[in-house]
Image (tube, rainbow, N blue to C red):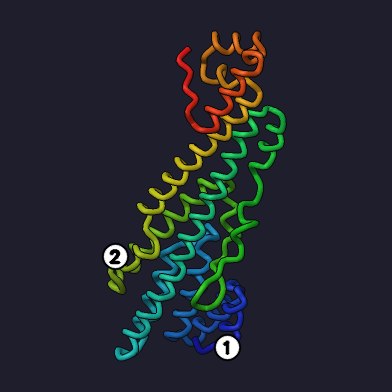
Amino acid sequence: MDNELAIIAIKGGRFSEAETIFNSEISTSPSTSAYFGLGICKLNMLLDVNRSVEEVKYCFEKAIGLAEEESRKVLTGQAVDYLSTVLSQYSSLYHQLEEQKQKEAKAAAVGAALTIGAAMVGSNHKSNAFTQIASLAVAGAGVGVAVDGLTKLGKIPEMQSFLIETGGKLIDSFVSMGLVQKDELLTHFNPSELLASAAALKESNKQKANKVLSIVLAIFGINRFYLGKWKSGALFLFSFGGFGVWYILDLIKVIKGEFNPEW
């Protein structure tokens, strides 16, 4: 990338500005550096959802095709290194979105148990999920991929699906160009592992949320009703929790995770 203004724009995260500069350069004197720089810009803006992996592939193919033979290997290595950086950011984004999603689900579960405050939990479902993930630390050019476009998708699961789809297409494109082996890229972005880790986190948080829910219900003395134990629940209420003794025993068992009434 010989164009200093474009390089400065990229380092500042102004990919659209750099893209315009490279487009102008290509229209007058197409070169390896111009196509490579344009590919970097388009790669960083793929999450704008109005972009195409094919654009990225075309730019890097042109850059490598125009390069002198002795420099193609170096150029290919640089392209793969930059792609690896971007894929690693995709993985980080996916994990942070999953944590945010589980946090919201947990809050909703507890809010529903308390009934009061449930409306407050529901009113936050459209909150911007990027308040905590907009500033990603990155290698390469020193800035993160542009993530603002993802917010157009709305809900977190849709953002995650788009990340999985885009990352997979990028991997397939670079492999089809013969630039890299698929296994090498999967170390940075592996859709199967991401989905598996998300499922594991969901299960872990579900267990934690259930325990919190059980404790909250036990405090109000309605945990037996929640489990469908209507007879013992009614007896519990009419006896004021066994005059307090039954209540204390139930609460201790719930906290220990040993509460499992038979009737």
- Residue 254's place in the image compared with 35, above or below, is above
Q: Dot 1, crowdedness within 10 Å: few (<14), some or many (≥20)?
A: few
Q: Dot 2, crowdedness within 10 Å: few (<14), some or many (≥20)?
A: few
Residue 234 image offset from top left, x and y in percent: 60, 9
Left or right: 255, with 85 as reference point: right
**Residue at image point 33% right, 62% down:** 172
- Residue 81's place in the image compared with 71, above or below, is above
Left or right: 65, with 135 as reference point: left
Residue furthest to the front: 245
Q: Marks 2 and 1: CB-CB under 8 Å?
A: no
Residue 167 image offset from top left, x and y in percent: 42, 60
**Residue at image point 44% right, 80% down:** 36
**Quarter of the figure with residue 222:** top right
Residue to which mark 2 is pinned:
183
**Residue at image point 48% right, 37% down:** 207
Nearest to the observer: residue 101 or residue 230: 230
Residue to which mark 1 is pinned:
4
**Residue at image point 65% right, 51% down:** 128
Nearest to the observer: residue 261 or residue 68: 261
Looking at numbered disc 1 in the image, what kind of residue is underneath it?
Glu
Left or right: 47, with 165 as reference point: right
Q: Earlier in the sequence, mark 2 or mark 1?
A: 1
3D distance between C-alphas at marks 2 and 1: 35 Å
Say which element carries label 2.
helix
- Residue 106's place in the image compared with 99, above or below, is above
